[in-house]
Amino acid sequence: MYVLDAKSTSIQVTVKDGGLKLIQIQDNGTGIRKEDLEILCERFTTSKLQKFEDLASIVTYGFRGEALASISHVAHVTVTTKTADGKCAFRASYCDGRLKASPKPCAGNQGTQITVEDLFYNIATRRKALKNPSDEYSRIVEVMSRYAIHNSGVSFAVKKQGETVADVRTLPNASTLDNIRTVFGNAVSRELIEVCFEDPKFAFKMKGYISNANYSVKKCIFLLFINHRLVESSALRKAIETVYAAYLPKNTHPFLYLSLEVLPQNVDVNVHPTKHEVHFLHEDSIIESVQQHIESKLLGSNSSRTYFTQTLLPGPAITSNDFIKPSAASATLPGSSDKPYAHQMVRTDSKEQKIDAFLQPINKPQEGPPTTVSTDGRTVCQDSEMEDISDIDLLAVEEAGSSNAIIQKPLHPCNDDPSSAPASQELFYQILIYDFGNFGVLKLSSPAPLYELAMLALDSPESGWTEEDGPKEGLAEYIVDFLKTKSEMLQDYFSLGIDEVRILFKEGNLTGLPLLLENYVPALEGLPMFILRLATEVNWDEEKECFEKLCKECGMFYSIRKEYMLETEPHVSPNPGQQNQELGTDKPWKWTVEHVVSKAFRTLLLPPKHFAEDGSILQLANLPDLYKVFERC
């Protein structure tokens, strides 16, 4: 596909014996200069890099020193090329990466023609490993067809040598939809939905065409281009097919053409020897965004469906009386109900289950009037329905007047697990390591003065301040001045914003925090101690220790800590309307732990070994023991 980098608008490919005898590629691009022909097939040769930094943002299809150098060692290569300002074309032959003779002038059109003959003539074992010529030709046609669909402004033509009709031919002024119609037929093109989506958060764009619910095939047709390179992504394929499973018949699949554009510095193109697969930053989040957008498109296009019916053959009419109905007596027999077959059952997703389904329910007492329980000398009203602690919170309610009641202490059984704190701390620590320098920003509604935060932390017994340490005001001013000197590094690497705007006669304010998880905001009650520990517990002189300790302090601040969860839980009013007004749109910690943090445990946490030793993670089963069980069966 180097011809596309040469700004070609017409590409013709001629093949003989599946490419073993001849592969000829001709384009009308910029051509190759005569002085470059001598090193054309040598290793590491390229004209696409101007400076060393260009390697970090590669957007081309490759270098001559990769493909041409390799092919010249296993085949006879001839190159005929002409530039726009050249008076004539030049032809050169290569063998083992070297020029056989000096280039000779000849007649030719603008562009380049590369001829590869006798592929693998000197490697018999590699030649025998190839399939028959017809299969190899089919692969060439498939690849060229997919690139023809993606490059709608370029004319592609693929044919066998000696034939006048091309197997694939697209026009230079054809659209992407026209090229899909040319390659896959009108049955596909008329059932396509255009998709276009852009996410500035993860810095990617998506466009393409997907089939609606009226079209299905036995094998999924998935054309995926990432930064204009044809690749495969099994994770993205599975995610999209999961969406289509609710719309298409069983064992059928859709047609998909997607083009993703990701920042070049976020893409790793060297994870596969043939560059058949690529990995990129925030891959799981981008796949989830693509999945949600495709699902929304399918929901909007599901207003009309096409069904095919079969005409009944002539014969006697069948009435409803011909069907035998079971009698009422047989329906009441114990053994009359048949066991449902496999096709009658409904498949469910195990990921949608909750841990509440595995907990044993508490035996509820007999129905009766509400009972009273004495707690610390106070009379507490307790209804029998409040004994199910898996669904609601246990509330110790103190009587205050005739009809008003206030909350003394809310208890959350689901969050009392002591292992949740180290597990969540390790989770956020690993997120900080993995996404280093690529965080979003949680903007504070109003800047928080660092001086006041430091004073709050020093007033807390947790800080361990004594009179021997000096006055608190002096220590607070030192913390502010010290963090201001590190503000640029904290902003660039951790999205921790600190400005120097003067508020209440003090400079230095906290403006933002790193966004580590979507829909997750840490308990801001721990913010004063976090600021204090940043200035006192981090070794800023050693780079490795500074980075490690800073990530651990951030992980501790973002972790789930029981003391802050109990204090920050909103007060509940006995009036339901008043309660909704006070709670607003803030989601309780129980919802956050269940739907945000627990989900991140499954996808982002790599548990360390010591978690299995200290009881943070409990092993339920292991594969060797399961094999022993199956061997006895």
Image: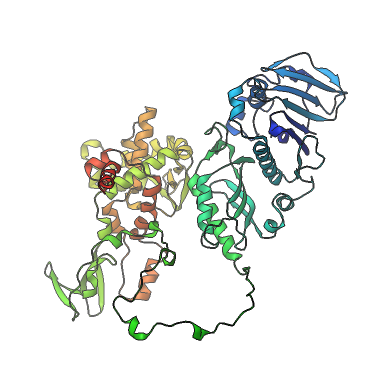
The quarter holding residue 537 reads top left
The image shows residue 550 at horizontal and vertical percentages of 36, 37
Instruction: From this view, report whether residue 75 is shown above or below residue 430.
Output: above
**Closest to the observer, 145 or 386:** 145
Q: Quadrant of residue 402?
A: bottom left
Give the residue at the far front of this rendering. Answer: 315
Report the number of discs.
0
Q: Return the x and y of residue 197 as percentages of the image width and height.
A: 60, 53
Question: Considering only vertical position in the picture, is 107 above or below 366?
Answer: above
Q: How is the image coloured?
A: rainbow
Residue 374: x %, y % from top left: 12, 71
Q: Is residue 2 visible?
A: no
Q: Quadrant of the N terminus?
A: top right
Residue 73, compared with residue 61, is above or below; it is above
183 left or right of 509 in image? right
Does 212 sit left or right of 586 as displayed?
right
Residue 284 visible in this rendered orientation of the protein? yes
* Residue sitting nearer the eye, 193 or 183: 183
Farthest residue, direction top: 101
Residue 585 lies, with reference to residue 364, above or below; the image says above
116 left or right of 260? Answer: right
Q: In this view, does 234 lie to the left or right of 382?
A: right
Q: Where is residue 118 in the image (x, y as percent from the top left)?
A: 70, 24
The residue positioned 47% from the left and 36% from the top of the image is: 488
Residue at 53 percent of width and 49 percent of height: 237
